[in-house]
Image (spheres, rainbow, N blue to C red):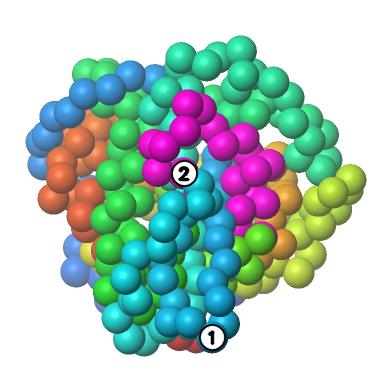
């Protein structure tokens, strides 16, 4: 149900190289690849099953790098110098909190290269009503600060600053135009009760229409494997028990945000909002900080090579 409201594919085994990378990191994990923690937490919001995301911006090569937003907001102060100085990361908070107020607009179909899909969806929510769109913004803000502290220039595809969207094709375009070194789309799943854990979605080899992922498949797989390994280590959450064959990695060719990307990009499904145990994690601010840290560590490891 998440991502373009399409039904999640059946579990697929990842190539040995990617699975081995995750396995190696799992061996060093504090909690390992076992079950997740069960803190509690609450919040508010509302939504339904949903799709994907991306990012944007560009900076003057002669000026100190600054953070910017696709809406054209005034850049902030120069970034601190750090190990990620000179690198651009686009964070794509899945969905938009107000998409549910603009169903006609988000239901409009857009070209994803290999076909057409809805502009965007509302996303899912916990049983108590904590919206995925609120979750993704919160985690994206935390992730932005962690990356900026290391000197990275960070661009959000949106920041709750527009009435709906952006559409999935625009999300991809934002990352492409930013010439991002990495793009991470932040999500939470909306699967059945009992389905638990996180998974990272990688782009399949797709070519058709305006889509051609041939140049980013390998680099995106590397990015995804590093994020998955660090996510396990930092959050203690296990890889998905229903997608990815226990690797925490899945490959899809039906998502416009990945199909139309020309830069390394992955989606991170942080957990299943419809499962009460996963929901307890996702609604806990302390766990969300760990989720952001795990993603930041994975991104940094990828960018540092």
Q: Label 2: how many residues lie within 10 Å, few (<14), some (14-19) or many (20+)?
A: many
Q: Position of residue 216 (x, y in %)?
A: 69, 67
Q: Label 1: how many residues lie within 10 Å, few (<14), some (14-19) or many (20+)?
A: few
Q: Position of residue 230 (x, y in %)?
A: 34, 68
Q: Residue furthest right?
A: 209
User: Are the residues flagged by discs 2 and 1 in contact, CB closer than 8 Å?
Assistant: no
Q: Position of residue 249 (x, y in %)?
A: 51, 55
What residue span does the magenta drawing correspond to?
Answer: 156-176
Vertical arrangement, residue 62 with respect to residue 215, above or below: below
- 278 sits to left or right of 187: left
**Of the two numbered discs 2 and 1 in the rendering, the one whose residue sits closer to the viewer:** 1
Vertical arrangement, residue 20 with respect to residue 136, above or below: below
Q: Is residue 115 visible?
A: yes
Vertical arrangement, residue 251 with respect to residue 298, above or below: above
Badge 2 element? loop
First in sequence, mark 2 or 1: give its number: 1
- 198 sits to left or right of 107: left
In the foreground, 192 or 83: 83
Residue 266 in which image quadrant? bottom right
Is residue 247 rendered magenta in the image? no
Q: Residue drawn 65% across and 43% down?
A: 170
Q: Residue drawn 32% across and 86% down?
A: 81
Q: Residue drawn 27% across and 74% down?
A: 149
In the foreground, 21 or 235: 235
Residue 41 in which image quadrant? top left
Vertical arrangement, residue 282 with respect to residue 232, above or below: above
Residue 209 in which image quadrant? top right
> Which residue is identified by label 2?
158
Q: Position of residue 5 (x, y in %)?
A: 58, 26
> Which residue is identified by label 1?
62
In the foreground, 204 or 93: 93
């Amino acid at each position: 149900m998440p991502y373009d409201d399409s039904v999640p594919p059946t579990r697929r085994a990842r190539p040995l190289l990617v699975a081995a990378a995750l396995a190696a990191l799992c061996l060093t994990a504090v909690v390992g690849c076992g079950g997740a923690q069960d803190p509690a937490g609450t919040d508010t919001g509302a939504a339904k099953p949903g799709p994907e995301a991306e990012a944007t911006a560009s900076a003057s090569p002669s000026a100190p790098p600054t953070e910017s937003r696709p809406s054209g907001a005034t850049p902030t102060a120069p970034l601190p110098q750090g190990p990620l100085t000179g690198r651009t990361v686009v964070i794509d908070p899945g969905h938009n909190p107000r998409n549910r107020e603009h169903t006609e607009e988000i239901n409009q179909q857009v070209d994803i290269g290999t076909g057409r899909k809805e502009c965007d969806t509302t996303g899912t929510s916990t049983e108590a009503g904590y919206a995925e769109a609120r979750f993704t913004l919160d985690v994206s803000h935390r992730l932005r600060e962690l990356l900026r502290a290391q000197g990275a220039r960070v661009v959000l595809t949106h920041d709750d600053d527009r009435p709906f969207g952006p559409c999935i094709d625009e999300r991809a375009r934002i990352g492409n135009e930013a010439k991002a070194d990495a793009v991470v789309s932040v999500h939470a799943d909306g699967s059945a009760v009992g389905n638990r854990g996180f998974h990272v979605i990688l782009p399949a080899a797709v070519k058709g229409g305006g889509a051609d992922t041939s140049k980013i498949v390998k680099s995106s797989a590397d990015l995804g494997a590093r994020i998955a390994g660090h996510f396990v280590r930092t959050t203690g959450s296990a890889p998905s028990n229903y997608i990815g064959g226990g690797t925490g990695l899945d490959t899809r060719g039906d998502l416009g945000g990945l199909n139309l990307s020309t830069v390394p990009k992955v989606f991170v499904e942080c957990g299943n909002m419809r499962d009460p145990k996963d929901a307890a994690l996702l609604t806990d601010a302390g766990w969300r900080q760990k989720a952001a840290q795990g993603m930041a560590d994975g991104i940094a490891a990828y960018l540092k090579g």
